[in-house]
Every structure is written in C-alpha cells, then in structure tokens.
Amino acid sequence: MSQGRLLIVDDEASVLASYARSLTDAGFEVAEASDGADALRRIERDQFDAVLSDVSMPTIDGLTLLRRLRIRSPELPVILMLEAPDNRVAIQGTECGAVQSLIKPVAAELLAQTAAYAVRLCRSRRNMPTTLYDYRSERPSAASISATDAKNEFGRILEKAIQGGTVVITKHDAPKAVLISVNEFNALSRANRVKLDTLSGEFDELLARMQTPASRVGMKAAFDASPKQLGKAAVAAARRRG
C-alpha cells in the first residue's frame, strides 16, 4: 500500500533522482519536477499529498512556488530543502506555511519521516469539516498571498474569489486586504442587516411595553420605594417564581 503521493521539485537531476529513489523505496509514489513551473503544471493535472521542493531554482524558486501553492492548493503541505543553513529563508518559509525546512543532503530516513508527517497532515486537512459561518454560507479557508504575487496572479486569484473562496493579500507578510466575491459580500451585508433589524424591532417592542400606564405606575413606585420596601418586593417576587 502506498504511503502517499509525493512531488519532488529540484533543478539538479542527480539530486532529484536520488531523493525520488529513496522515497520510492520507503513506500511512496513519487513524481518529479525539474523546476517550479513544471511543478505547478503537474499539480494542475494530478493530486499529491505533499511537495518537497528545493529553494534555489531559476525562474520560480521554492519560496515563490510555496506562495503560489497557498493560493491554488492551501491544504497541500510543502517541505523546503535548503542548500545551506539560512535562518532568514527558514523563517520566510514558516511564515508562508512550509511544514519543514531541511538542509541538504537529507538522510533517507529523515526524508521519509518528514514526508510521512506531511502526508498525514494533508489527509487530516482534507478530512477537516468546513466551518459554518453566521450567515449560513460555507466557505473554504482563506489563502494568503503577497502583493507582488497578487499582481502576477490576479486572474487566478480573481477566479478563486468569484468561485466563493477568500484571498487574504499581504504586504511584508502582514495582512492588508481581503478579496471576496459579490455573493459573499452580499451575504455578509444581509446577515448584519438582519441582525440589526431584529435588534431594532426587539428594542421598539420593549420600549412600547415600558410606555403603558401600568408600567409607568410601576416604575414610579419603584423609584419612590425605600430600600426596605425594595427588599421585600424582591423576596416576594422570588417566592412567586418558586
């Protein structure tokens, strides 16, 4: 039985072949991509449980690939592989949602253990129930993207929002804007309007009850009563309630 379907991305053919062979021996189904663009094409066609990507690649590097996958497949775990220890890149990867950052060369046992964890994480995400919002419209989890990537990927981002997704646009890794469809916006607006109208109606009804002659007499008696009289009235009311 397969341990999971993996996609390995690396522009060095020898490294790609070595890691693919190691993970295949560990029981995984493995596909290979020679760069970030090739990886995105494969992910469009096939379903994977995790992606292991080199960071230093031409055109679309590992971090850029990670950011784009957060839009296209937010549930898909990504493991980054660095040529050398680099805290800055590791932190950026974590902030963008990387499961782990490994330093090459990666031992076969560690590679398999990390891949197995990523596969379990992916399957748990796919089985996670969708959140039901107050306005009773189910939506997928929000994806996060930098402003630069938003400019480059606007057509795809817009289509995701139109289909009911939510895209959080960040600048310097801080949330700055949210893109949602008109239907989502109208649902939110209607929900707030219904709540406001309901509260207004309840308040008007309460105010009307307070304006009856009997209510006015009772309020005047309460304000004119002494503390002892109020105490007795409270005890009597409690006894009537049982």
Image (spheres, helix red, strand yellow):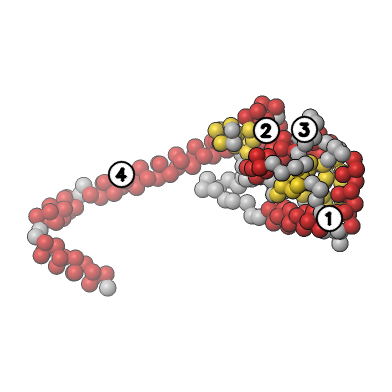
As helix, strand or loop, the secondary structure at mark 1 comes to: helix
- Is label 3 in a helix, a strand or a loop? loop
Classify residue 145 by image quadrant. top right
Q: Residue at x 67, y 33 (%)?
A: 157
Q: Which residue is mark 4?
A: 204
Earlier sequence position, callout 3 versus callout 4: 3
Which residue is at 51% across, 48% downward? 134
Mark 1 to mark 4: distance in Å? 71 Å
Q: Is residue 99 above or below residue 69?
A: below
Q: Earlier in the sequence, mark 2 or mark 1?
A: 1
Q: Indicate the amino acid at tag 4.
A: Asp
Task: Give the number of the disc on residue 157.
Answer: 2
Residue located beneath label 1 in the image: 108
Give 131 or 238, whichever is nearer the viewer.
131
Between 10 and 133, the one lying in front of the other is 10
**Which one is in front in this view, the residue at disc 1 or the one at disc 3?**
1
List x then y, in percent, for residue 17: 90, 46
